[in-house]
Image (cartoon, rainbow, N blue to C red):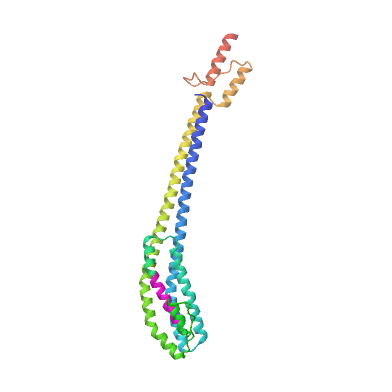
Amino acid sequence: MKLKTTLLGYGLIAVISAATLGGIGYWAATKLDHSISGMAESSSDLHAALVADMMHDAIRADIFALTLALQNTDTEAVKAAQDDIVEHSKLFNDSIEKVRKSDPSEQVASTLKTLSPKLDAYIASAAEMSAIASGKAKMAMENMGKDKKDKPMEVKSSSKDVLNDLNAKRPDFLVAFSDLEKEMGDFDGLVEDENKAIEENSNNMASNSKTSVLIGGVIITILLMLLALVVTRRIMATLGGEPAEVLETAKEIARGNLANHIAVNSGDTTSLLAALNQMQDSLRILIL
């Protein structure tokens, strides 16, 4: 086989080895990217679940604040509590909806399905009590799902009557709170467990990717070192010595110096240096 062909073959092997190492690196990077994306989405779901849990308690606190404000006939505090109820209810719904749209697991999706009607009932109960505090009984009925075509009807009520109506509704509100509390506990636990599982899986994936790249790098490095050794030995066997030495020997013969001693390896009859030695001996015989 010609030296050129041999070197091209070795070069091809080197290119394939480098491409293989690059492929391993790309695979590892893809795995890590997928892992990071999963962790980010899981962390986002966990954050949304925590916000939902806080809003669950915040709405109850808003109702207590609303009752206290009515007792103190503090209209500004009443308005602030009502605004908080609206804001916290929206955050509650938005947080649950965010998890629902994030392609959750079957367990989380099932829990959300069970949780949703209780969430609606809880928020509707809070909205009803807020409406009662405003003296708008019709609005309260609308929030409970009654005929929304009718216009809200203002109901003139004394502060004491409104407070009595509010206190009368409180047991229903607390029941709705308690019914939702268990579902929220299950929901938070599932999201947290899944977050931990994804985090652990991501860490394992990252570790495996690093190991794969390291092992692949070591194997490719050893292969290239062996390839370099084989190429070097092949070239040296073809030349019969160092390139500079062979070149200088050829120049000496070209100058007519046939007395130069050429050191040929024992048993070497095929290298370029061996051929030069044979040529020098032949020329010396012809001239002498």
x and y percent of residue 267 in the render? 46, 19
Say how many tags the image has: 0
- Residue in front for this viewpoint, 143 or 218: 143
Q: Could you tell me which quadrant the C terminus lies in?
A: top right
Q: Residue at x 56, y 15 (%)?
A: 279
Whether residue 65 is visible here, answered yes or no, is no
Answer with left or right where residue 149 lies relative to residue 110.
right
x and y percent of residue 175 in the render? 36, 78
Q: Residue at x 54, y 17 (%)?
A: 277
Classified by dominant secondary structure, the portion drawn in magenta counts as helix
Residue 60 in which image quadrant: bottom left
Magenta-tinted stretch: 116-130
Q: Residue at x 58, y 21 (%)?
A: 249
* 192 magenta-colored: no
* 120 magenta-colored: yes
Whether residue 168 is visible here, answered yes or no, is yes
Answer with left or right where residue 109 lies relative to residue 233.
left
- Residue in front for this viewpoint, 39 or 172: 172
Q: Where is 161 relative to 218, above or below?
A: below
Residue furthest front in the image: 149
x and y percent of residue 70 in the render? 46, 87
- Residue in front for this viewpoint, 121 or 96: 121
Q: Where is 173 relative to 10, above or below?
A: below
Residue 173 in which image quadrant: bottom left
x and y percent of residue 245 in the render? 57, 24
Q: Residue at x 38, y 66 (%)?
A: 113
Q: Where is 115 relative to 139, above or below?
A: above
